[in-house]
Image: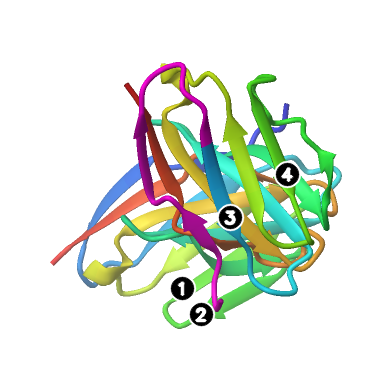
Amino acid sequence: ILNVEQSPQSLHVQEGDSTNFTCSFPSSNFYALHWYRWETAKSPEALFVMTLNGDEKKKGRISATLNTKEGYSYLYIKGSQPEDSATYLCAFGGSNYKLTFGKGTLLTVNP
Amino acid sequence: GAGVSQSPSNKVTEKGKDVELRCDPISGHTALYWYRQSLGQGLEFLIYFQGNSAPDKSGLPSDRFSAERTGGSVSTLTIQRTQQEDSAVYLCASSLLNSNQPQHFGDGTRLSIL
């Protein structure tokens, strides 16, 4: 059974704070690591797909890094805004099609 | 359509009834996935389609669950003789083939079994 762990489980920050979460995954049979944002009453939205060790991706105030050798990825949010409130999911691709999702980190940004 | 479409958005039914959930993927996406999220749990993989065939059905929780895809497009997930533990949000996603591509999700079907 593949173990994809995300921490923390939930997080409350103030508007303007920067924050980060962790996703840990198996370091073998790696194809890809995905990050998704899932807002309440909406569908999960893809943020990043990373495939290479050392990858860093950025989208506005959100960025992610990848270490496939040690099996972890960090997601960073700079200057959090209330609209960043959502559940952030990571998913490990251990084959050419299948993703195994973590349980997510629920972020609440207080105005 | 522009995105992945799922119907119904909500379904409430009595224990023991059959239900059918529908997913219309993004045009041209050969890969289609069904997931479910039960209360307090992460997204659980159910089944994967490549075109009309399902190479991986390993996530289907019991033989009451089945799925098909026709014409390389629309997929239906059928749950027979529903049980209360089937209550969950059922999500469909599609992508270009392989896990290096992002998956595009529908809004899900919230299934409640009374």
Q: Amino acid at mark 2?
A: Lys
Q: Secondary structure at mark 3?
A: strand
**Which residue lies at the image location 57% right of the left edge and 24% below the top edge?**
B80
For residue A58, above or below residue A74: below
Q: Secondary structure at mark 4?
A: strand
Disc 2: CA contacts within 10 A as few (<14), some (14-19) or many (>=20): few
Quarter of the figure with residue A53: bottom right
| Residue position marked by numbered label 4 in the rendering | B68
Q: Amino acid at mark 3?
A: Cys
Q: Chain of mark 2?
A: A
Residue A62's disc is 1
Return the x and y of residue A50 as percentages of the image width and height. Answer: 70, 66
Whether tag 2 and tag 1 are in contact, CB under 8 A, the answer is: yes
Q: Per the image, is B75 magenta? A: no
Residue A59's disc is 2
State the CA–CA distance, disc 4 to disc 2.
36 Å
Q: Secondary structure at mark 1?
A: strand
Q: Nearer the viewer, residue B84 or A4?
A: B84
Camera-near label (3 vs 1) is 3
Q: Are marks 4 and 2 on the same chain?
A: no
Residue B23's disc is 3
Disc 1: CA contacts within 10 A as few (<14), some (14-19) or many (>=20): some
| Residue A69 seen | no
Q: Chain of mark 1?
A: A
Q: Amino acid at mark 4?
A: Glu
**Which residue lies at the image location 50% right of the left edge and 56% below the top edge?**
B6
State the CA–CA distance, disc 2 to disc 1.
5 Å
State the CA–CA distance, disc 1 to disc 4.
37 Å
State the CA–CA distance, disc 2 to disc 3.
29 Å
Camera-near label (2 vs 3) is 3
Whether tag 2 and tag 3 are in contact, CB under 8 A, the answer is: no
Q: Chain of mark 3?
A: B
